[in-house]
Every structure is written in structure tokens, then in C-alpha cells.
Image: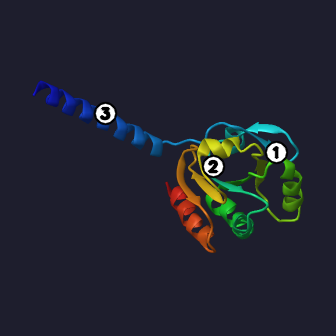
Amino acid sequence: MKRTTALIIVTLLLTTITVAQVKKMFTDKKVPNIEVSTLDGKKVKILDAIGTGKITVINFWATWCGPCKLELNNIAELYPDWKKDYNVQIIAISIDDSRNTAKVKTYVDGRSWNYTILLDANQDLKRALNFQAPPYTLLLDKTGTIVHSHTGYSEGDEYILEDQIKALAKK
């Protein structure tokens, strides 16, 4: 009887700890401060690039990813209004490997993307965030806390993202 009671107490205690740990994983989640590169090769910590005080959209993409390019092109059309209306910044991070980083600059130069472009050529940040494939989008509040993440892209997702940005801007 004592053994059963002890087992129940230990199980409840471990369950409580596990629930608390899982809850912590999904609240107050921050972007890990991994080093990435600018298009000109300068190393920068991602948290320095994000800064504070602005709603931030981080979009992971690749030159070989058709949905990624479509999403970023569609967001580019809305971005001037987002900046003005919601004080939002967009950081597009390419996960192209080091053999293809030259393609990234060439591709970006041919677009009207007026947001920060960074490179995660070794995919260290991708691994730290534990996502499988682009496009992968994070929405951060003004304190840098991840409040939403989304994998994939369907035409019109940028309007859903705008609704989430608008809700954050009101807080």
C-alpha cells in the first residue's frame, strides 16, 4: 500500500513537472541568439538584427522553394502599408547552403524586397528552431517573444498574417 501511494505521488509530481515544462516551451519562447550573415558576408547575431520595440516577421525561405518566393513577393506588396500602419519589420532568412549564397543575392537584387535579408547557410538557426522545410514564418511581438509560427504557404496567407500583426499592434 505504501509503495502504491508513493508511486502515485511520484507520478503526479512528474506529471506536474512535465506539464509545466511543456507549458514553458510554448510560452515566452524567444528566438535563439544564433549567428547568421548579411548578404555581404558580415556576421550578425539574430537578436541584434531583430532589435526591440517592433513587431517582427521572420520568414525562412530558399531560392529553390517556389512557395517561399511567391509568399515573399506577395508580402512585398503589402509591406509598405504594414510598416506605416503597424510599425512592423520583416527579416527574410535564406536557408540556401553556402554553395548557393551567390544565387540569393542575385535573386534578391532582382526583386523589390525592402526588408532585411539574412543568410543561415549552415542552417544553425533552422536547426535551433527545429523546423523541417521552408517556408516557415515566425511572428514576434515587440519584446521579441514568438507569438505565432506557420509552416508552408497558400495564396492569401499574407492576409491572415496581417490580421495577426494588426491584433498585436493593438496590444
- Per the image, label 3 sits on a secondary structure element best described as helix
Q: Residue beneath label 3, please?
A: 14
Residue 21 visible in the snapshot: yes
Amino acid type indicated by mark 2? Lys
The image position of residue 11, as x and y in percent, is 26, 34
- The CA span between labels 2 and 3 is 38 Å
- Counting residues from the N terminus, which is met first, the one under dot 2 or under dot 3? 3
The image position of residue 122, as x and y in percent, is 75, 42
Judge by depth and name the residue closer to the eye, 99 or 154.
Answer: 99
Q: Residue beneath label 1, please?
A: 38
- Number of numbered discs on residues: 3
- The CA span between labels 1 and 2 is 20 Å
The image position of residue 115, as x and y in percent, is 76, 56
Q: Answer left or right for 147 relative to 66.
A: left
Q: Residue beneath label 2, please?
A: 54
Q: Answer left or right for 64 relative to 60.
A: right
Judge by depth and name the residue closer to the eye, 100 or 44.
Answer: 100
